[in-house]
Amino acid sequence: MTTSETLLPDHAVEPERYELHAAPIYHFDLARRDFFKVFGGGIVVLLLLEEALAQESGGGRRRGGFGQRRPPELGAWLHIGENGVVTVFTGKAEVGQNIRTSLTQVVAEELRLPISSIHLTMADTELTPFDAGTFGSRTTPDMAVQLRKVSATARELLIDLAAGLWKADRKSLIAADGRIVHGETKQSAGFGELTKGQKLLKAVADDSPTTRAADWKIAGTPVPKVDGRDFVTGKHKYTPDVRLPGMLHGKVLRPAAFGASLASLDAKQAEALPGVTVVRDGDFVGVTAPTEHAAAQAIAALRAEWKTTPQISERELFEHLRGKAPGSQSSGDSAAPKADPGEEKPAAGDYRLQQTYTVAYIAHAPLEPRAAVAEWKDDKLTVWTGTQRPFGVRDELAQVFRLPAERVRVIVPDTGSGYGGKHTGEAAVEAARLARSAGKPVKLVWTREEEFTWAYFRPAGVIDITSSISSDGTITGWECHNYNSGGAGLRALYHIPNQKTEFHQARAPLRQGSYRALASTANHFARESHIDELARLARMDPLEFRLKNLQDARLRAVLEMAAKTFGWGRSKPPPDHGFGIAGGFEKGAYLATCAEIAVARAGAKVQVVRVVQAFECGAVLNPDHLKNQNEGAIVMGLGGALYEAIRFDNGKVLNPHFSQYRVPRPSDAPQIDIVLLDRKDLPSTGAGETPIIGIAPAVGNAICDATGVRLRSLPMAPQGLKI
Amino acid sequence: MSKVTELHVNGTTRGVDADPERSLLSVLRDDLDLTGTKYGCGEGQCGACTVLLEGLPAHSCRLRVGSVGQKKITTIEALEQGGRLHPLQEAFLEVGAMQCAYCTSGMIMSGVALLKKNPHPTEEEIVRFMEGNICRCGTYPRIIAAIKRAAAMPGDAQPATSGRTGGLK
């Protein structure tokens, strides 16, 4: 088995960002006085990711500069104020995955404190430690573990303080209900009583002990969204809701097509409008105005000519990605699929199957579009923006405006979703550029059309699979080539001795980047469809065929659980209905999905009637939010499975509106039953992404069950079923 | 064209000074700081901007503020009265009917309009009524469950007769 990856230069594609492992450029200073200046007295516990710091108090430690010993990387920190208030600082961003709640839970667990006593400060580059970004389902396996460690250490520190105060044996002291209590005398003290007058800074190494999942009392329970009330009342301020005194509204002139350059601009009419300023800087043209309406009018009044260049259109897409279209370029040492699966020729009596699967470009379409509010004050730039990479956007801003990073602050209000689509800082850069010229704060909110056009897309791709099975239904060979969509989830978890998988990057015609679960959705669609095709060739039940060919006990467990709950094999589907099953693994989590679909022959309409999904991601932190992620991912995944596709022609998106780009709506949602396998003996892994990977193949397999027609392209039914 | 100088919002008359061509959404958000109502698409397709106009759901992104006149506008901010949430807000919290929650205001306003018109809707009626509201996080099953739950709550889930939303009659 080989997995290889060849890369084109950076400019060719928007990289799937969390596959990059660049070290952070900036590090927080560990100056103790700075901490207490910012946060006030009390105790601070820091988590050191790399080396255990010898000088725990850290006083006077300065950033070393290049060539000197690198300061250790900080993961998170926690402050207990002299009033007993617990504040946790993490660079992660809340985008609807409910980590503000799950992270609060783990802190509450270790500190033996009610949820309501803890506040999380998230994703603010001035207040929180560096974090590469909220992606890759890393919050639970990394940040939750770090916060458990700092919280456990803080608890022990409080016990030390109480032991000193009462001259008691620390072994007789426990933390309970936000107090340190003496087991025998019942003497107790609140956290604030113990931290009063203290300025204690403690650094924790990565191996601090924490509470076992089996003993959790707050973690592992269905705690509701911690600030839910602010959302149902409309009080929460997302980025577009931020308002600063004297703020103007900004808007950017968009080119006529991708890659176009500005040939000429006549701004006279726009500049004559009251309160309007036009900013031109190279190919960037934008306006500021007192209202959004006036800004839109000013943009409409600009007369611009653009120089465009011919570009790949959707009809040539898949040939182009494979490297077969004229003028296209493919990388990788095997641009064309090899005929032989694995190293050996299939033995006599084996079946061989070769099929091609494709996935379209799709848009994230987060309901909160890209937005930013930028303010320059005393040579310092502050930007509020909805991004999954606050520090990445800070660095973008620092680079664009040639500022040292410490003069840029990025604040991320809890954001109206991202799905991997908000890794970049376009709106932040645009708002900051306009604000610099205007000399006033500027708010800029992308229109839906801009979001559909100028954000980046989930990569389209072509996947070729060649396989062989023996007459008893054993998979004997497997070769899979993914062109452009990505390498995530490419390797099959089935037990296949001759397995070869390769990812080939192409020169992508559209700007592409991360999307929830990356290419795992595409690769699972291809593989789990192909597995179903093999099961049919072997005349075996699709579940039985899968179980026969796998050894991974965790994958087996979710498949069996989903099948049992669904009633797989217990009855035949009604006429014009079909059953489908798929299993998978991604980002440390396992899932199996069973779907029942109904086909209305007259309208060629396919309706997903019922879905059962079994999910296992180690010890569950919050079962209700985990179910919610699963349900939501199934509904969202139906869009890419059945009807979502970005249509494009010669550098233009043809369907940049919700009226033209169909996303799932209430009537599309099936009856959903989520079964969680809570493995308290295993580390918790993330679950914001993996729940989306099973639905497309399960639905495709169910369509084939109902109609006998195998659909190998996502979306499968953009204009209804064509069968 | 003459400017719009007042709007009847959430039971009070608010003075504004707005170009009549502007959207009601932008005047609510930018001039009156009622930011609970969201921009999602600007074309009446996603429902994030839903407010009630004389008790009926309306897409404030597509409404010229100059066309509103004396009509009574109700936004999400008016549902909580004296620290008490509207039953549908309670139900959204109890069911956990949100993820990023950017659609939530619009969902709740549409749901309130539905329950006002039809206090005990069937599931089909809920789905049909809510079809114009998009939740990209895909929480529709929970949103539908929350509306059912509010409809089943003891007392009256209708703001119109409970008198807790001033803008409705």
Image (cartoon, coloured by chain):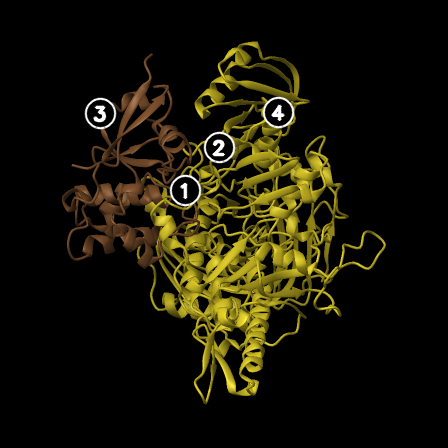
Chain colours: A yellow, B brown
To which residue does mark 2 refer? Answer: A245
Q: Secondary structure at mark 3?
A: loop
Which numbered disc flags the more N-terminal residue, 4 or 1?
4
Is A206 left, or right, of A612 in this rendering? right
Amino acid marked by disc 2: Pro
Chain at tag 1: A
Chain at tag 2: A
Chain at tag 4: A
Amino acid marked by disc 3: Gln
To which residue does mark 1 refer? Answer: A721
Residue A242 in picture, x, y percent from top left? 47, 38
Q: Secondary structure at mark 1?
A: loop
Is disc 4 on the same chain as disc 3? no
Is A459 left, or right, of B28 in this rendering? right
Q: Is residue A549 visible?
A: no
Q: Secondary structure at mark 2?
A: loop
Q: Is residue A301 visible?
A: yes
Is disc 2 on the same chain as disc 3? no
Viewer-proximal residue among B166 and B41? B166
How far apart marks 3 and 4 lie (CA) works out to 40 Å
- Check if mark 1's residue and mark 2's residue have beta carbons within 8 Å: no
To which residue does mark 3 refer? Answer: B70
